[in-house]
Amino acid sequence: MPDRAALHIDGVGLKPGRAATSQTIAGGEIVGLAGLDGHGQETFLKMLAGLEAPAAGAISIETAGRSAPVTGFRKAVASGIAYLPRDRRATGIFPTQSVLDNFAISTVGKDARIGLISTAERRRRYEVFREKLSILAPRPDAAITTLSGGNQQKVLLARALALEPKVLLLNDPTRGVDVATRHVLYDVFRGLAAEGMALVILSSEIEEILVLCHRVLVFREHEVTAEMSGDAMTTDAVIAAMFGRAA
């Protein structure tokens, strides 16, 4: 596991004229993002990934005392930020490719030997993550579309983890997966945090956030309108904040 990192969000605004937010997300912390659909939490997550530019402020990642600005997706990845998209079919998997190719597409350089791709090295890395994430696949060269939705999601997570990120951004990571897969993923997320990784999880399910996260940021009308942790982080409190009411 690489050195712990901290993600700094300094005066970031989601839209012009909306209140900005400043946050620090530390290594070992799981932070949840909640809100009604379209109220800014997905935009915020994509800003952290370098996929969208903030209307104001700046985002940076600090590792071993050195700070690097997040000014685009490539820079974010190079600095140790990995992003798992929400819609695995539209923006995640390559449906015409194999399980192994889907896993290795973002880390081709790690498999190169004297300018050539080493299939053995690629399979070795895949097997490490297959075991860690309990991926159920008939064989590495099987089409990824032959896998269940939950196992496709695990392959995408394995792809992200193969980058050895310091910060993992998860956009509704258990959407459309079965209960057994959901609990496997929960255990993986907790384990990553225990090893020092920072995780930010956007979830459409409040209970998921309460079960997994150390604190939650609630979005309303493209602003962070509430931040909760500990005993204050309850279903009633999160719902009330989402609708702009007192708990």
Image (cartoon, grey):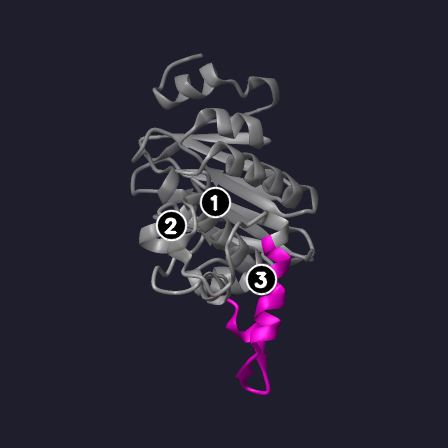
- Tell whether label 3 touches label 2 (CB within 8 Å): no
Using the image, tell me which numbered label, if any, was put on residue 126.
3
In-front residue for pair 180/112: 180
Residue at the image point whose x is 59% and y is 47% from the top: 134
Name the quarter where the C terminus is drawn: top left
Q: Amino acid at mark 2?
A: Arg
Is residue 189 in view from this perspective?
Answer: yes
Mark nearer the viewer, 2 or 3 = 3
Which corner quadrant of the image does residue 165 belong to? bottom right
Is residue 57 in view from this perspective?
Answer: no
| Residues drawn in magenta | 106-130
Where residue 227 sits: x, y (%)?
A: 50, 27
Q: Main secondary structure of the magenta part?
A: helix
Residue at the image point whose x is 61% and y is 60% from the top: 127
Which corner quadrant of the image does residue 190 belong to? top right
Is tag 3's residue or tag 1's residue first in the polypeptide sequence? Answer: 3
Q: Amino acid at mark 1?
A: Leu
In-front residue for pair 214/164: 164
Find out whether residue 107 is within the magenta segment: yes
Residue at the image point whose x is 43% and y is 64% from the top: 98
Is tag 1's residue or tag 2's residue first in the polypeptide sequence? Answer: 2
Q: Is residue 47 above or below residue 108?
A: above
Query: Residue tagged by mark 1?
Result: 170
Q: Is residue 15 above or below residue 92?
A: above
> Label 1, label 2: how many angstroms apart (C-alpha)?
12 Å
How would you rate the neighbour count of disc 1 (Cα within 10 Å): few for under 14, some for 14-19, many for 20 or more?
many
Query: Residue tagged by mark 2?
Result: 88
